[in-house]
Structure formats: structure tokens, C-alpha cells
Amino acid sequence: MAIYKDLAGKKIVITGGASGIGLATAVRFVGEGSRVAVLDIDRKALDTAVREKRGIEAAIQADVSDPAQVARAFRETDGLFGGVDVLIANAGISIRKDFVEIPDEQWARVILLAKTMALELAPFIRVNAVCPGYVLTPMQKAEYTPETLDAMNLKIPMKRHADSAEVAALFAFLASDEAAYITGAEICIDGGETAGLS
């Protein structure tokens, strides 16, 4: 059931969209009536996602650290959608340059770029950083024993890991008109974990 009516028909691209948080986010936006393309390096996972999660319009294999593959993926997406309204991506280190001057090889390594982009692109484009804590994705489940999971949960104020759908809900809110005045924000969704840090 759609919650944010303005997301209907919006063109959404989600990197790392074949599993975990990315796939949950794709499912959420499909539920909002959006047109969704997912990018992922894993072809098998992409095929499974499209087969099992109805409504994803495009599943494009691409390594987002490779500029040529990213360019090809977005040409393909643009050919299908005729543009993009929302991009949900992950990033790495801090580089002290205007974002338009960052070389491709450094783009592949950047995090915390959201603030610079938010300042430079406002008021026409909003940019926010979603900062999840522990999320019980398939990758996490594979790394944990039941005892390890219990021990990790005890360290989190909410006493549990997030579900991927909870992070997806935050992405949907931020992409909606309800968040029209939010840009340049770093939004933690970590069950209170960072609140306990001094």
C-alpha cells in the first residue's frame, strides 16, 4: 500500500539493489508505485531479485567502482526511463574538492560527499546520507552464529538489529515531498547505538 502518493511514477535507481537493504528499498518503492531499476555487481542475485520481487523494471549488472560500467548502466536506465528522479547510492572517503572536480577513481572511494553535494546542488536537488547501524541482511546472517547475534544485539539500545525494510522506509520518506526541506543531513538509523557514544 502506497504511503507517499507523490512517489507514484517516480524513476528510482538503486545501487546494490539485488539484496539486503537495496532490495528491500526496491520493494518499498515498487509498493509506492515508483518505476524501479536496480544495479548490482551480482548477475545471479539480480536475476533472483527480478524473479522473486515483482515490479522491478530493470536489473542492470554493473560494478559501481568502474566508471565505464556506471556510465553504461545509466545510459541503459536513461533509455528505459528517460531520466532519473531519485538515486540511492553508497559512498566512501572525504576529498577536499568540488564534487564536479573529483576524478573518477576517487569517486569510487568517497563517503560523506552528501554535504558538499547538498550545498552545491540546492535548491533544485536534495542530497542526504542515510547511516544505518546493524541491519540483519542476508550477508550479516551468514557471518553470525546465534550466539554472536545475541551478543551483538545486547550492545544495541533497541536490543536488536534493524530489518532492511526499516531502512527502506527512511529512503522512501526522504525521497517524498514530506522531506522537501531536508538536505545535507546525516540521518542515523541505528537503534540508538550512536546516542551512547561520547
Image (cartoon, rainbow, N blue to C red):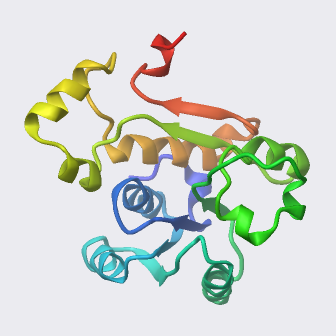
- 169 to the left or right of 145: right
Residue placed most toward the observer, 139 or 126: 139
Q: Is residue 67 visible?
A: yes
**Where 132 sits versus 91, above or below?**
above
Q: Residue at x 51, y 71 (%)?
A: 36
Q: Is residue 123 visible?
A: no
Find residue 177 and report its horizontal and vertical position in percent. Answer: 68, 45
Q: Residue at x 30, y 70 (%)?
A: 53
- 57 to the left or right of 153: right
- 33 to the left or right of 7: left
Residue placed most toward the observer, 190 or 105: 105
Q: Residue at x 76, y 36 (%)?
A: 181
**Where 197 sits versus 33, above or below?**
above
Q: Residue furthest left?
A: 146
Q: Determine the image quadrant of residue 56.
A: bottom left
**Where 158 sits versus 71, above or below?**
above
Q: Residue at x 63, y 78 (%)?
A: 70
Find residue 10 and report its horizontal and vertical position in percent. Answer: 62, 65
Find residue 114 and report its horizontal and vertical position in percent. Answer: 73, 46
In the picture, which quadrant includes the C terminus?
top right
Q: Determine the image quadrant of residue 130.
A: top right
